Image (tube, coloured by chain):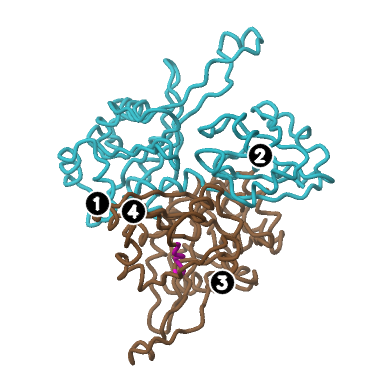
Chain colours: A cyan, B brown
Amino acid sequence: MLHLVGLGLADETDITVRGLEIVKRAERVYLEAYTSILLVDKAKLEAFYGRPVIEADRELVESGSDEILAGADKADIVFLVVGDPFGATTHTDLVLRARELGIATNVVPNASIMSGIGCTGLQLYNFGQTVSMVFFTETWKPSSFYDRVRENAQLGLHTLVLLDIKVKEPSLENLARGRRIFEPPRYMTVAQCAAQMLETEAERKEGVCNPDNLAVGAARVGAPDQKIVAGTLQELADSDLGAPLHSLVLLGRRTHDLERDYIREFAVNQATFDASYQKGYGASS
Amino acid sequence: MLHLVGLGLADETDITVRGLEIVKRAERVYLEAYTSILLVDKAKLEAFYGRPVIEADRELVESGSDEILAGADKADIVFLVVGDPFGATTHTDLVLRARELGIATNVVPNASIMSGIGCTGLQLYNFGQTVSMVFFTETWKPSSFYDRVRENAQLGLHTLVLLDIKVKEPSLENLARGRRIFEPPRYMTVAQCAAQMLETEAERKEGVCNPDNLAVGAARVGAPDQKIVAGTLQELADSDLGAPLHSLVLLGRRTHDLERDYIREFAVNQATFDASYQKGYGASS
């Protein structure tokens, strides 16, 4: 059987008791290590599980799924995923491939940033569709996120923005030369995301990501040193939330008083927060 | 410190290792037992934790929060929540009250139906806002859900519908007489939800919840006997997914091929599924 086991958000102790039991008795254990990361490394997981873990990079998962699935018709094979197993499309692919091969699958859910973002005090049923923000380059600044944010904003809904990570990516130069040498990992910060949203606003000028629009930044959700800040997009572009992983929520105008009270405690500056809030947020807006 | 610990979705083994450690060493442990339920009872939890658990009903949480928080400035008090701690507004209230009293709080995230619904194969970033469906009565059939679903549908997005549960609710007659006698618990089924959506469509006639619109029903997400069915709303109104808890997703038209392939396997009837799908679903619609 193929078991997709969610690891949750922060460290090795965020696995569920059900998940840990499966990991301990499985024949092989893979760790999906490119769409998200835990805040601890593989060695820490191996020590906690008391067994080896095989790192599965994008290449192995996307081209070598049959290698992962080998023997899963008879033995238990585990595929560990940071957050919840269904957070990324890739894993749906793996289950579909298992189905084709007649291999049974079992999923062990866990916390995902999609629900964990509730730690900000923003109500999950006030969120619209989730968007992703990729690292802009000199020549590639995709703004499709802006259209999705606008759709949410028109309904008064919050938007969760998931921030790009680059792990084991070859540089363009090494890619061209066919060398398997990787760039150091990069994790987008709340400040970088806010700056890219402002850059896109300056380009598109539709008033979706204004400098005085309110947003909430969250870092290391679920970890003991979790950090949350609230402020204008301009303030967040100047913020520093420390180590990864970061996420950002652009506030929708259909905000409940309870949500305001909760996030106001995290404001970079309560005066600018109140001023921006009064300009157009709140349930009656 | 007040610890809000998520229990996940199915049984006692869905708690995280981090959460279990906190439960074992805490002074008092409360179980929030009215906005959702695990598929096992309190006695099973107590046996697993090796300690007593205090059931917290709506009355205690909403009017007796200071009783829950008593001593939390010095000792560890745990408040167990099915799913993720921030799934329901009530718990935000409890944290705000703790803040007022100067009591530190710690949240242990877990799987929520908001992310667990990914087990259907539908991509979480294709969902719009989540809605709730309450039990209709002869005189009270609130249709605000219909407006939210329409907003999502206009953007081509899926809608997760969370289904009503009634636990420890006094009957109207007993309420009027001031008697603390409760009705037997009731959990809405996928079939009841689909029927109420069709009833509202017949009333509103805006084409948001047509009998041949596609939907996915999910029961006991995360449990070994989890069940998923896909079909038209009419088919789901005639379905039987067994024991609670149930959830329903109304499919948005911006469906990806990979999502279709995944849910088609769960179709009540693949011929009607395909016929409805071809009428207007798919990424290009």
Q: Which residue is mark 3?
A: B189
Q: Which residue is mark 4?
A: B74
Q: What distance separates the C-alpha of mark 2 from that of mark 4?
A: 33 Å
Does the image show residue B111? yes
Let me know if marks 2 and 3 both belong to one chain: no
Question: What chain is tagged by disc 3?
Answer: B
Q: Which residue is mark 1?
A: A261
Q: What distance separates the C-alpha of mark 2 from that of mark 3?
A: 39 Å
User: Residue A282: x and y, percent?
Assistant: 23, 52
Question: What chain is tagged by disc 2?
Answer: A
Tell me which numbered mark, 1 or 2, is placed earlier along the sequence: 2
Mark drawn on residue B277: none
Q: What distance separates the C-alpha of mark 4 from that of mark 3?
A: 43 Å
- Please report the residue visible at 45 percent of the width from the left and 46 percent of the height from the top: A116
User: Local crowd at mark 4 within 10 Å, few (<14), some, or many (≥20)?
Assistant: few
Q: What distance separates the C-alpha of mark 3 from that of mark 1?
A: 35 Å
Mark drawn on residue A49: 2
Residue A170 falls within the magenta-colored stretch: no
Disc number lying in front (3 or 1) = 1
Q: What distance separates the C-alpha of mark 1 from that of mark 2?
A: 41 Å
User: Residue B280: x and y, percent?
Assistant: 57, 52
- What is the secondary structure assignment of the residue under circle 3? loop
Q: Which residues are magenta?
A: B29-34
- Left or right position of B155 against A86: left
The answer to which of A210 and A271 lies nearer the viewer is: A271
